[in-house]
Amino acid sequence: MGEAVEIMFGNGFPHKDTSPIQTLLSNQQDCHWYEETIDDDLKWSFALNSVLHTGTSEYQEIALLDTKHFGKVLVIDGKMQSAERDEFIYHECLIHPALLFHPNPKTVFIMGGGEGSAAREILKHNTIEKVVMCDIDQEVVDFCKRFLTVNSDAFCNKKLELVIKDAKAELEKREEKFDIIVGDLADPVEGGPCYQLYTKSFYQNILKPKLSPNGIFVTQAGPAGIFTHKEVFTSIYNTMKQVFKYVKAYTAHVPSFADTWGWVMASDQEFEVAMNEMDQRIEERINGELMYLNAPSFLSAATLNKTISLALEKETEVYSEENARFIHGHGVAYRHT
């Protein structure tokens, strides 16, 4: 076995004459593993069948990999975004709790979501009249439309309005209010396009005024494991507490992320839905079967262990552009020669 050739993803790609994307494409048949750096001394590796596609947009590096264990996986800036076999966990947890707690959600604004899976889950609700999906990156959206065919119906749905623009600017200019606003954003990585959309000033001055009176905001909030919850999860939670009266954090294990993942939803109305009522709303409102979420599993997700609960309680940092926390690591693919 020869020396492993490393090809850097991440914030990512080394600036060399020969693009690592081209190197990756030219060596598809020899590339056996994708490797993501989780911490300085921790990596997570996936055996590959093939590299299906890589590309570079104005904002991000994009790759679609066919892995042996998780099926097709979408990688942006070297970070795993979703995997074919378990993305339903992430997207059901992101979307359905907020919509089920709302008495009658009709309009939703998605920040990010270019993959289309968040829109797919929202459109399962029969109360929905309009979904605006605002992603900054046309190439990511086009890429996902082409390769992630599981979301083709969502992209074609007449209730979906697709906007290619910075979500901050788009929300700021819109006069309408939304019942639900979803943050389906990439992780806040240094140099990435999304970290400003996790700040107190954005939540307070731009996002909250665009919520209807019973409106709910929900966002993915990064890793929430025993060793990783202080990266961004606790500060995002504390930041939302400064802006909204009621804030609820919940978590679930996502196997392809190699960690427990966190979401936070917030509103100025209390989250008061009994377990039996939540299951009834699932039955009445949602077309088709959910694969992960029901009332007991949400109750479990919102029941946090002592370490996480205390960390959320004691967190004092407020996320700002000047004082931002970032997710650690970037992706690495390598081949054996």
Image: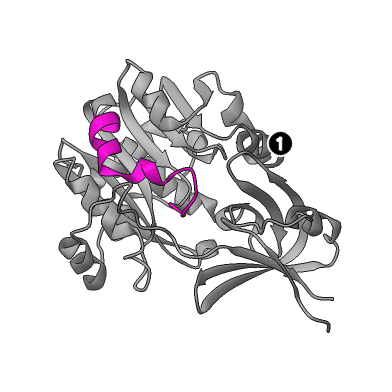
Question: Taking 262 as reference, is 168 above or below it?
Answer: above
Badge 1 is on which residue?
146
Among all residues in the image, which is located at the extreme top?
Answer: 175
User: Dot 1: within a 10 Å radius of its alpha carbon, few (fewer than 14), some, or many (20 or more) residues?
Assistant: few
Residue 206 part of the magenta segment = yes
Please provide percent x and percent y for residue 15.
Answer: 68, 56
The reply to whether residue 148 is visible in this rendering is yes
Please provide percent x and percent y for residue 43.
Answer: 56, 74
Q: Amino acid at mark 1?
A: Arg
Question: How is the rendered protein coloured?
Answer: one colour
Residue 131 part of the magenta segment = no
Dominant secondary structure (helix, strand or loop) of the stretch shown in magenta: helix
- The quarter in which the C terminus is drawn is bottom right
Residue name at image x 27 percent, y 56 percent: 235
The answer to whether 290 appears left or right of 48 in the picture is: left
Among all residues in the image, which is located at the extreme bottom?
Answer: 1
State the residue in front, 275 or 271: 271
The answer to whether 89 appears left or right of 157 in the picture is: left
Specify start and end residues of the magenta stretch as a single range.
188-208
Please provide percent x and percent y for residue 324.
Answer: 34, 53
Q: Secondary structure at mark 1?
A: helix
